[in-house]
Image (spheres, helix red, strand yellow):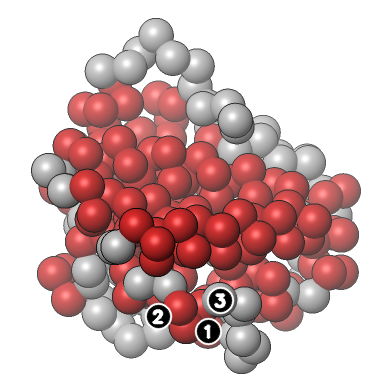
Amino acid sequence: MPARRTSQHKRSARILMGLLEDKDHFTAEHSRNVARLSLKLGESCGLNKKELAELELGALLHDADKLNVPDEIFDKLRVGAPLNEEDLRVLREHASLEGEIPFAKEMPKVVRDCQQLHHENYNGSGTPNGLKRNEIPLSVRIVQVADTFDALTLNLPGRRGQSKHEALRTLGEYAGTILDPHLVTQFTQLIRGHSARPDHPESP
């Protein structure tokens, strides 16, 4: 990305993250963690500087469409209240909700892919297009692994996250069905190689 355009994208991302923080702190924290973890996995995959910059933006904004999720659902999440079937459906399908996300059209395709396709599954059972294996862009598959790990370990009201060891075991169970098995193996090696770190990365 040219330097000027990269700067514009970063400013747009900061604005979107501010909106997401106002909407729901836990989603914003999760997004920052996913960006950090995705960068580590992307680096281990040999992505170049431009690819890493776009991956970081895509990971950071993968949940940006949750700006369209009704506030009352986040109100329930904040206090650990149970969600009904409709609430769960909206959360599952947030990436396909109608509604214009600010700055979406100006972002690189990688960013739009991460936002729209991160609920695809490696075996083709996901949404919205039933993509499988390498039909899912590498950047999206990287974000999916980071997203799943952080979601498993994130502490939420009424639900304590899994330990690092437990989350890696769960990732292994998802390998080949929901997640790219090769990336799961690579990610697991990365996390285990940083065993001195806490179970869950802290927000900046």
The numbered mark, 3 or 1, whose residue comes first in the sequence reads 1
Q: Is residue 124 left or right of residue 73?
A: left
> Element under label 1?
helix
Marks 3 and 2, Cα distance to the nearest angstrom? 23 Å
- Give the residue number, with chain letter if any, for mark 1: 96
Q: In x, y percent, where is residue 95?
A: 52, 77
Specify the amino acid type for callout 1: Ser
Are the residues at dot 3 and dot 2 in contact (C-beta closer than 8 Å)? no
Specify the amino acid type for callout 3: Phe
Q: Is residue 60 left or right of residue 24?
A: left
- Give the residue number, with chain letter if any, for mark 3: 103
Are the residues at dot 3 and dot 1 in contact (C-beta closer than 8 Å)? no
Res 57 quadrant in image: bottom left
Q: In front: mark 1 or mark 2?
A: 1
Q: Is residue 132 left or right of residue 82?
A: left
Are the residues at dot 1 and dot 2 in contact (C-beta closer than 8 Å)? yes
- Give the residue number, with chain letter if any, for mark 2: 127
Specify the amino acid type for callout 2: Thr
Q: In the displayed structure, would residue 193 be above or below residue 167?
A: above
The numbered mark, 3 or 2, whose residue comes first in the sequence reads 3
Please tell me which residue is depicted at 69% across the width and 71% down the height of the picture. Answer: 67
Q: In the displayed structure, would residue 189 be above or below residue 136?
A: above
Q: In x, y percent, where is residue 69?
A: 72, 74
The C terminus - image quarter: top right
Res 136 quadrant in image: bottom left
Marks 1 and 2, Cα distance to the nearest angstrom? 9 Å
User: How many C-alpha atoms fall within 10 Å of the one at disc 2: few (<14), some, or many (≥20)?
Assistant: some
The numbered mark, 1 or 2, whose residue comes first in the sequence reads 1
State whether residue 66 appears in this view: yes
Q: In x, y percent, where is residue 172?
A: 28, 42
